[in-house]
Amino acid sequence: MLKVLVADDHAIVRSGLSFLINQQANFEVVAEAANGNEAFLKIEQYDIDLIILDLNMPPGESGLITTQRIHERYPDVGIIILSMHEEQAYIDQAIKNGAAAYILKSSSDAELLTALKTVARHKSYIDQNIILTKTDIEKINTPDLDVDLKGYTDLSNREKEILPLIALGYANKEIAAKLYISTKTVEAHKASINRKLGFKNRVDLVHYALHHGLIDF
């Protein structure tokens, strides 16, 4: 039985997806998440095999960044993007960041189930309504696509979790509660983030996060 995590900011969507998936043989939804950080934490907690991930779960970390962090930390987890974004730039970047499949929310249930079963066999799948051109494939295989995240790659996994929460205005105690760590640990990570990225205050951090698409409102 493969363990599935459903991550979407709408409870009714999570409920519908969970019902659909639980009707399939060999698949069971064992956890749900309403944002990227929550999804990241539950992967390890529930030993997840597959995740169905929405790219837009405001307010919070960009789904593209969540995809990248999950793939880097848990490369064996099959990431299936289910998104309303039909723009080719989103699709290209999601695949580049580690998504094994990309499905449009406007597509039928059959497309999602096909993706689920295909990724379970460790293969990739793209919604039949999406056509990847030669240019798209070149972009996907080209290092450092889009924004220059110089400095961001030097952050630890925990610092990457904390950065969007700081940018969104969460207090140290709130961040500590969300990530199950102490307030002092949060303060230490914030200091490290500012040092590594050269920030003098939270305004600098917010500008950086917005400019590089690290958060969604």
Image (cartoon, rainbow, N blue to C red):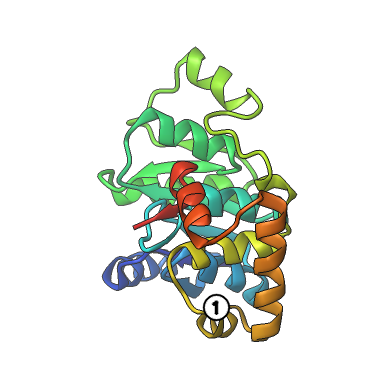
> Quarter holding the N terminus?
bottom right
Q: Which residue is mark 1?
A: 175
Does residue 200 appear in this view?
yes
Q: Amino acid at mark 1?
A: Ile
Residue drawn 36% across the image and 48% down it: 83
**Residue 200 position within the rendered picture, expressed as x and y whole percent measured from the top left:** 59, 57
Furthest residue in direction top, as rendered? 134
Residue 189's place in the image compared with 193, above or below, is below
- Residue drawn at (57%, 28%), measured in percent from left and top? 145
Q: Residue at x 31, y 51 (%)?
A: 109
Q: Is residue 154 left or right of residue 167?
A: right
**In front of the other: 87 or 47:** 87
* 45 sits left or right of 5 in the view: right
Q: Secondary structure at mark 1?
A: helix
Q: Is residue 41 above or below residue 51?
A: below
Where residue 148 appears, as percent x and y from the top left, is 59, 33
